[in-house]
Amino acid sequence: TAEVMSHVTAHFGKALEECREESGLSAEVLEEFQHFWREDFEVVHRELGCAIICMSNKFSLLQDDSRMHHVNMHDYVKSFPNGEVLSEKLVGLIHNCEKKYDSMTDDCDRVVKVAACFKVDAKGAGIAPEVAMIEAVMEKY
Ligand code: BOM
């Protein structure tokens, strides 16, 4: 659900500042991670892909090939309140997007395509959070 997704985004987003330097993602492109879900934010910058890889690695959510680690992602999402209602859906949506871009060899370029696909499909599935929902739970993490 969107409510659970707001918790996951709030927690995941806390890793952004640790990853800014190495990813090269400027505040002009993305100031706060929760803006990822804004209607007018375009998920297109290679540096965002690099940042998502770096952030995911802080929580061991990727395999060595920078594809999702299914078990760890499942466990990560389940660790949030009501997480078990979202985890399978989220893993399924991300994996479906990974399959579409599997031939891309640059990890940062590929992951930003996967993230853009995930944003579209999460909206379609009704699990995309409103930015206000994320802001309401930020202080918990
Ligand atoms: O193949 C690479 C897999 C990368 C998975 C991350 C895609 C989604 C990142 C953008 C949105 C994040 C919101 C919440 C955290 C989900 C882990």
Image (cartoon, grey):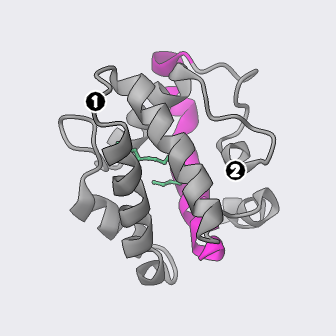
Q: Does the segment drawn in magenta span residue 123?
A: no
Q: Image point 81% across, 40% down: which residue?
A: 40
Q: Distance between the residues labelled 2 and 1?
A: 26 Å
The residue indicated by pointer 2 is 37
Q: Indicate if the residue with disc 2 has its beta carbon within 8 Å of ligand 1.
A: yes
Q: Quadrant of the N terminus?
A: bottom right
The type of residue carrying mark 2 is Trp
The reply, left or right, for residue 38 in relation to residue 128 is: right
Residue 5: percent from left, percent from top: 58, 66
The type of residue carrying mark 1 is Ser
Q: Quadrant of the C terminus?
A: bottom right
Please, is residue 2 above or below residue 65 in the view? below
The reply, left or right, for residue 51 in relation to residue 62 is: right
Q: How crowded is mark 1: few (under 14 residues within 10 Å), some or many (20 or more)?
A: few
Please, is residue 67 above or below residue 118 in the view? above
Q: Is the magenta stretch mostly helix, strand or loop?
A: helix
Residue 82: percent from left, percent from top: 50, 84
Quarter location, residue 110 = top left
Q: Image point 58% across, 32% down: which residue?
A: 17
Q: Residue furthest left?
A: 64
Residue 70: percent from left, percent from top: 25, 59
The residue indicated by pointer 1 is 103
Bounds of the magenta span? 1-24
Quarter location, residue 102 = top left
Q: Which mark is residue 15?
A: none
Please, is residue 106 above or below residue 92 in the view? above
Q: Does the segment drawn in magenta span residue 19?
A: yes
Classify mark 1: helix, strand or loop: loop
- Residue 131 appears anywhere in the view: yes
Classify mark 2: helix, strand or loop: helix
Q: Image point 61% across, 52% down: which residue?
A: 120
The reply, left or right, for residue 32 in relation to residue 113 is: right
